[in-house]
Image (spheres, helix red, strand yellow):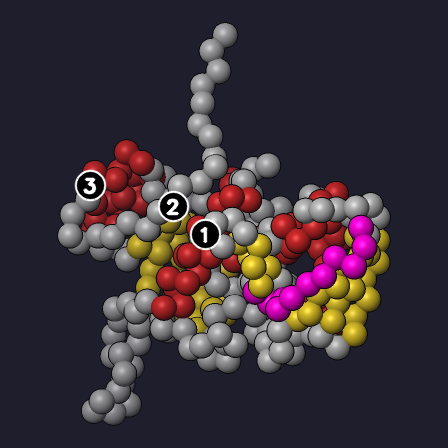
Amino acid sequence: MKKPLALLFALFLAVGLLAGCGGGGGNAGGGEKAAATKKLTIGDTTFTPDNLEKTINPHDEYSGWACIRYGVGETLVRYSDKMEVEPWLATSWKNVDPLTWELTLKDGVKFHSGRTMDATAVKECLEALVKNHDRAPKDLMIDSIEANGQRLTIRTKEPRPAFLHYLGDPYSCVIDVKAGVKDGIVAGTGPYIAVDCKSGDHLTLKKNDNYWNGKPKIDELTIRAISNGGTLSAALQSGEIDAAYGMAYESYPMFQNDKYRFSQVATSRAFFLWMN
């Protein structure tokens, strides 16, 4: 795997940060006590075509990581800090038999398109996923899907004990496929709505005022694709960006002071050198 599933919950922490933190910005105008528009610019070394994250369309290679990282998409289940599967867009599930899974979906969730998320919409999304993605068909092994209100019944071609875990992979972000994909932009259910996306350059987002899990605290987000670690560090030092994702370890000493805060977590990724 290009990126281990054990990294997933670190991304969910990033999404929580975006949903709960404020940023700087100019005055919104319109009154003596007008609230300031909170903006945040993030530099990211991974949001690039070379890293197989061309856009935020989760059905395209590894772009699901960008979709979930920046709060556009959400999956049916997610991972806790202890790497245990927990509810997200699905509230509960049952493994009826070795081939059958029943999931109950959360009520009151809407896509950025305005459409209500129900079992039919999720069925359409999963069917499009296995049709267009390279890894999902082999992982999920879906044979059939039935939709009934907020209940989703999925049968697999063979027993898949790790089926739920694959539903937590970023490629499984639930999107409104009927809304289509335009310039790499999809309609997810998350706290931020993508309004502009240029592959390898930038992603612009605005807060989702109709988000099901509370009001996002940042009004506008700009993600800048910066593939060079040195350039990323220089941009953060100069104030050109407010935060950095994917910073090189050798740059850490430059930011170990009271002006910066690190958010990091141990993962199962292994680094090694093979000598002949």
- Which residue extends farthest top? 276
Whether residues under marks 1 and 3 lie with C-beta atoms below 8 angstroms apart, the answer is: no
Which residue matches tag 1?
Answer: 81
CB within 8 Å, label 1 to label 2: yes
Disc 3 crowd rating (10 Å Cα; few below 14, some 14-19, many 20+) is few
Q: Nearer the viewer, mark 1 or mark 2?
A: 1
Residue 94 located within the stretch drawn in magenta: yes
Q: Amino acid at mark 2?
A: Val
| Rendered view: 15 above or below 53 | below
Q: Element type at marker 3?
A: helix
Label at residue 23: none
Please state the horizontal and vertical placement of residue 50, each as a whole percent of the image. Answer: 51, 40
Residue in the picture at 62% in, 46% down: 61
**Label 1 vs label 3, nearer the camera:** 1
Residue 115 or residue 17, whichever sits in front = 17
Report which residue position mark 3 lands on: 254
